[in-house]
Amino acid sequence: MTESHGTVWTKKDLIAIADLSRAEIELVLDTAPQFVAVSKRSSGIKKVPLLQGRLVVNWFHEPSTRTRTSFELAAKRLSADTLSITAAASSSVKGETLHDTLANIEAMHSDVVVIRHNCAGAPLLLAQHHASHIINAGDGRHAHPTQALLDAFTIREHLRRRRNDPNAGLDGIKVAIVGDILHSRVARSDIRAFTKLGAHVTVCGPATLLPPEVEKLGVTATCDLREAIAGADVVYALRIQMERQAAGLFPSLREYIRLYRIDNDSLRHAPEDAIVMHPGPINRDVELASEVADGPRSVILEQVSNGVAVRMAIMHLLVNGGAAS
Ligand code: NCD
């Protein structure tokens, strides 16, 4: 089932949401439920053979627990062979270029290479010069497309359940993204995905953490949390990267918490049925209070479960394209 509303997947790589049409995003979201079902099997094998005999290489140059394990599990549930390379243990520390490392990986006949790199643009550079399907698992501040796709899927599933409508989509909903927008590749990819799917996005944080001219991405920007979350269907909290405070981008953590923390008190200004999301890892009780992270509005662990299915969908589409499953 790789076709949805007549859209057929033709892309070799997944580098950024900006490269995808609305129909391609919807194709990924429509392909994911069959993989949710695979992971939920209570008896039998939690696997399908769609990537059997293929080699998926996870190549991470930055720390990651969730994203790396999610990709690894997704590849395994598609029956692929998997290899993990971490920067500290790879020849990059001996001066090997990214191209040479990938050429060596490809000499072992890799099919999919999942790369996370602190330099924005590294996955695109590799995709342009190598035959493997490249998936960007986060590059610098630029993009984190699989996070955006799993976030969009989680929101859509929630809306479908809440409205009891199997065709509900993000059209016309309001999403508030709160925190360090400036340094966040998740925010950038989420904004692209949510707006392409018809959502209204408001970004909110201290002025120093909002990118200049962010409105050009088609969002509303505000420093006022109440205004941001009023009428929101989704409140999306981002991690406050502690190193930013040392750089003087906000006066104090206490001040940030007072003005921007998502907790039961600030959530009084959001609709009662608004859901709360976070990409992880959470700084508990900084950007998000534990009472909310662990409370009934939180869909954070659903994001994690859906992440595996959405990454299975992406790998299946990239490798098997328009072929029937
Ligand atoms: C994010 C990342 O690494 O970009 N986390 C993730 O992938 N789940 C967000 C973050 O580190 O704050």
Image (cartoon, helix red, strand yellow):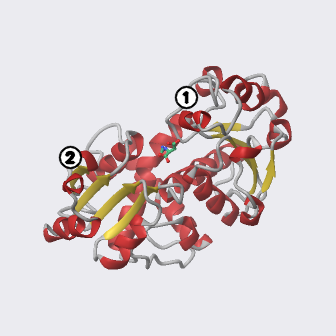
Q: Is residue 193 above or below residue 221?
A: below
Hey, which quadrant is residue 259 in on the image? top right
Question: Cβ(mark 2) to ligand 1 < 8 Å?
Answer: no
Going by the image, does 132 lie left or right of 196? left
Q: Earlier in the sequence, mark 1 or mark 2?
A: 2
The residue at which mark 1 appears reads as 283
Query: Where is the N terminus found, in terms of image quarters?
Result: bottom left
Residue 324 visible here? no
Could you tell me which secondary element the residue under label 2 belongs to?
helix
In space, the residues marked 1 and 2 are separated at their CA atoms by 28 Å
In this view of the protein, which residue sits in the foreground, 155 or 129?
129
Going by the image, does 270 lie left or right of 96? right
The residue at which mark 2 appears reads as 89
Residue 65 visible here? yes
Q: Is residue 240 above or below residue 106?
A: above
Hey, which quadrant is residue 11 in on the image? bottom left
Going by the image, does 243 lie left or right of 51? right
Task: Determine the residue positioned at 54% across, 73% down.
Answer: 19
**Which amino acid type is marked by label 2?**
Ala
